[in-house]
Image (spheres, coloured by chain):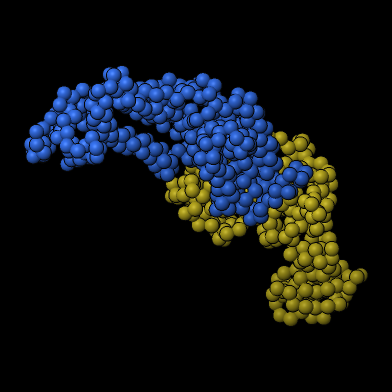
Amino acid sequence: MHTVEIAHVAKSFGSTHAVVDVSFDVGRGEIFGLLGPNGAGKTTTIRMMLDIFKPDRGTVSVLGGPMDEEKKDSIGYMPEERGLYQDLPLERCLLYLASLKGLPAAEARERLDGYLERFDLAAHKDKKVKALSKGMQQKAQIINTILHQPKLVIIDEPFTALDPINTQLVKDLMRDLRAQGTTILMSTHQMHQVEELCDRILLIDDGRDVLYGRLDEIRRHYSGHAVLVSAAGDLPELPGVIDIAPHNGATRLTLADHTRPQEVLGALVAQGVIVERFEIAVPALDEIFIRVVADQ
Amino acid sequence: MHKLGRIAIHEYRLNVFKRSFLLTLMSVPLIIALNVALGFYLESRGDDDSPVGYVDRAGLLADPIPAPVSGSREPLAFLPFSTEQEARTALESGQIQAFFAIPAGYPETRDATLLYLEEPGGSAIRQLYDFIQINLLADRPAGVARRAALIGEGVIKRSLDGSREVPDEGPSFGIIMPMLIGFAFLFLFLMNAGYLMQAVVEEKENRTMEVVVTSVSPGQLIGGKVLGVVAVGLTQLTTWAAVGIVAVVVASAAGIEWFQDASLDWDLILATVALAIPAYLCTAALMTAIGATTTSTQESQATGAIFFILHVVPLYLAWLIIDTPNAAVPTLLSFLPFTALLTVILRNIFASVPAWQVAVAVGLQVLYAAAALWLASRAFRLGMLQYGQRLKWRKLVKARPS
């Protein structure tokens, strides 16, 4: 059973077709990337998952069935439009929001103390939210999303406003949650974070799903017939190679249709070249994203 | 605890522990206390019971008849003086509070002079006139003189249907009470509906709405907020009522006559409450709708002010309503949303609003409240996630729910 199953959902607002036809599922304990350019329909899709909007068409199944009030306690959501009570002290604000998730006060306080320490916010717990920096508010928002130990976390742009140290902290946290069996659906424009964290992705464009599957399979699918080589000294002429071009400190060799990468490696070794790096050239997710969206 | 209860408690604490709330809460009893103190002061000035002197050169008060005194007033002593100099000395020594000099030609000129260092209170002046008047009528039968001196005193004004009476001194405390209750309701729900509107619009401004509705249902969110705000209102009302009761008891014990007649007109009170409850719901629902459809606190306050003005329209037309309480305009205002409560209260001060009109007004208010609640729930559902974008009223009425 999948944690999330979305089948052919559509949603329009007047004459605007926000989502036309989107289908995907998210398995238990995976980090799933929901990607797409601005206005593609990601937020509307998430809001339909959460029953904030009713789909005009299609079905939504979350945690084994249609969304209901009880399931809300098992979901953690951090929307794109961040929201904390600005005039409340941080600790009181987070405890109140945790109470709305059905978390008993004592348990919430105990867990919160741990997270505040981990996110380096303990010294700021009595400050009003509005007195905190953007990065601190972002961390507080993440704590609010996971404090009640949800089974499903839906998180929109989790790395915005975070410095590299805190970005790493959040990434570690997401990996920890995945290890504990929590399902994470992440929407972001930071493709390198997706490459690093996500198991599978869905790319939406113009309200339709245009790319869906395992990240490594997608990258392989979009890879050209090429290898990346770094070697001591210049590369010799190689049979079966039709183009040689520099690429991020290495050299990209485009192979003829009949040439296999193993043959190129063999030729390099045979010619006494000291090979420092040899890998199949797969495109970055950024490139795939641009290529797919441009093709639409 | 139920989530609705948690939201209600949160909302209550958020409002009640604000400095501005405590200031409002305390300022009203303080104003009442100041008014009571002022009343005491004025009353004590009026109750100066030291004697009044007179110098009678016209020979009218050679064998004076004492002036009749009505109600609980203390009768003043009138002391004769042979000369103005004697009277002035007595005045300056504090033996008398004032004296009047009646010249020899008084029967022709009707001119007398009143001298004082500090103006006597209303009661003293009235007794003084009554004293002269009854002695001028000394040659008439005693009953005639007494009625003349007492004219205007003890006259009871009664409504045509005989159901209500207003004494000459003005409406009693008991008669005024329904009006006070009505105004208290009006003040309460205008202020509390404002809190509710602010609570909704702040939730939108803070962007917490989207987070909260993934924890609770929109119904729980709005229900909790309404309960919390109503509890805030009850806190205010209870505090003020307690202070009011203490003030009335103290004033009554201190002998202020007006507070001693506390017989209440329960029909009027019931009519007021029956109108006030749906009117409160209607206002609260509309304020929620405004909070959900506008984009900022500032904008919501500006829109909410329009409804505030509509509520006090009857005050601007008060003279018309009081002069012709059963004419077409006051009757129409009694049936409209926002204006009904205050109009019925004002009409009831000097007339009796027919029972059928009260029943129709209450029925209409219930309908308005139901329509406002329907509109508010749609506004909330459609407008809660429209950040920085105003929800158009046409869309509110026509759009299919999300």
- In the figure, is residue A116 to the left or right of A8? left
- In the figure, is residue A246 to the left or right of B176? right
Who is closer to the viewer here, B175 or B18? B175
- Count up the numbered dots: 0
Where is residue A206 shown, x and y percent of the image?
80, 58
Who is closer to the viewer here, B326 or B254? B326
Measured along the vertical axis of the image, is residue A212 above or below residue B286? below
Where is residue B368 shown, x and y percent of the image?
66, 35
Measured along the vertical axis of the image, is residue A239 above or below residue B295? below
- In the figure, is residue B111 to the left or right of B237? left
Measured along the vertical axis of the image, is residue A204 above or below residue A281? above
Residue at 84% across, 51% down: A21
Residue at 26% across, 32% down: B129
Which lettered chain is shown in yellow?
A
Q: Is residue B147 visible?
A: yes
Who is closer to the viewer here, B198 or A274? B198
Looking at the rendered image, the quarter that the C terminus of chain B falls into is: top right
Looking at the rendered image, the quarter that the N terminus of chain B falls into is: top right
Colour used to depict chain B in the structure image: blue
Where is residue B300 shown, x and y percent of the image?
58, 49
Where is residue B339 shown, x and y percent of the image?
58, 38
- In the figure, is residue B264 to the left or right of B310? left
Measured along the vertical axis of the image, is residue B285 above or below residue B63? below
